[in-house]
Each structure stands twice: as structure tokens, then as C-alpha cells.
Amino acid sequence: MGSVARWIFPLWIFFSMLSLPPVTFSGDIPAAGSTLPKFQLQAPESDKDREYLGIGNVETFAISQINCLLVLIEIVGVYCPQCHVQAPLFNKLFYRIKKNSDVYKKTKMIAVAAGANPMEATYLRKEFRLPFPVITDPKFQIHKVLREPRTPFTMLVTKEEKVVFAHLGVIKDIDKFLRQIKKFIR
């Protein structure tokens, strides 16, 4: 086959593809201004965690059922190195929120451990001394509904399930992030 003939077919494929309509993906991960997709979370086993969330004695719950104005949802991976970097920062954030009773009443924090079974979620919580509930997502169901974001992925979501903040990666400036949280609950 001649050198010209070797290029004709690939060029024909290339130009044929240009004539196709553009592909658009409607399945982006949640962003500020969007509405959170509908899903149910497995309720934590701990009575203390259920009380913190204000969800009562239920098996599953929606974000809208959490007793607050704003929910910080952190999607984590048990084996994610960046999630391990963020864990102590979010511990500090939790305790800073807790110091301000008004912010604490209006804001709740949860971690959703994508792919984690209960034993892995317990390990994560104990290893990093997480003071907020860690919800398991062993079959990646929530992770898939959220369009499979890399971890850590953090969202601030209103009671009406509107996403007001979304961030992919480690949030290093906890003071700045706390100021943002305070703006959303005023």
C-alpha cells in the first residue's frame, strides 16, 4: 500500500467525525447553582450521629430531612490520599463551626465514603478522629448519582437541596471556607 493510501482512510474517518453533531454531556458533577440529584443516604447506626443530624430513627434519609439550613457533604474515598490530607482540616472546620452556636445549629457536616463498607467507614472515622457522621456508600450508588466525582469532593447544600458551593480537591484555607459557610446561613 502506498504512503498516500495509508493516510486517506484515517483522514476520511477524521473529517467524517467532524460532520457529526457535537456530543454534549448532561451529566456533570453538581455545581453551584444546580439542584442536588435525588438520593437516599443510609442512616448512621450511632444514636449520637442521628441526633446530630436530627433525622430520628429512620433507615434512610434525604439531605432535606437533616435538621439544619446548610449541609456540608464531603465525598471521600477511604484509600484516597488527598482525602487523608483534608481530614484534619475538616476536623478543625467542624470544631470551629461548633464554637459558634448559631452556625452550629444551622450547619451540619457529613462524609459519604464512596465504595466503603461499614468496616472501612468505621476505620476512616476512627483513624482520622472524624467528629461528624461518615455515611457508607458500598455500591457507589450515591457516587454514581453525583456523576462520579473524584475525591475529595465538597458541596454545601441548602435544605431545599440547592448546591450553593462545590469544590473538587482539598480545601486548604479553612478560615476562608468558614466565612463562605457563614454567608450562606445569614
Image (tube, rainbow, N blue to C red):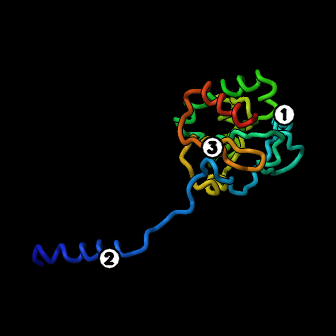
**Amino acid type at image mark 2:** Ser
Disc 3 target residue: 75
75 or 19, which lies in front? 19
Disc 1 target residue: 48
Disc 2 target residue: 16
Q: Give the residue at x 61% y 51%.
A: 30
Answer with the quarter of the image where residue 113 lies.
Answer: top right
Task: Check whether the beta carbons of the residues at disc 3 and disc 1 lie within 8 A of each other.
Answer: no
Name the secondary structure under disc 2. Answer: helix
Q: Quadrant of the N terminus?
A: bottom left
Q: Nearer the viewer, mark 3 or mark 1?
A: 3
Q: State which tag comes first along the sequence, 2 or 3.
A: 2
Whole-percent x and y of residue 160?
A: 77, 50
Task: Check whether the beta carbons of the residues at disc 2 and disc 3 lie within 8 A of each other.
Answer: no
Whole-percent x and y of residue 163?
A: 67, 47
Q: State which tag comes first along the sequence, 1 or 2.
A: 2
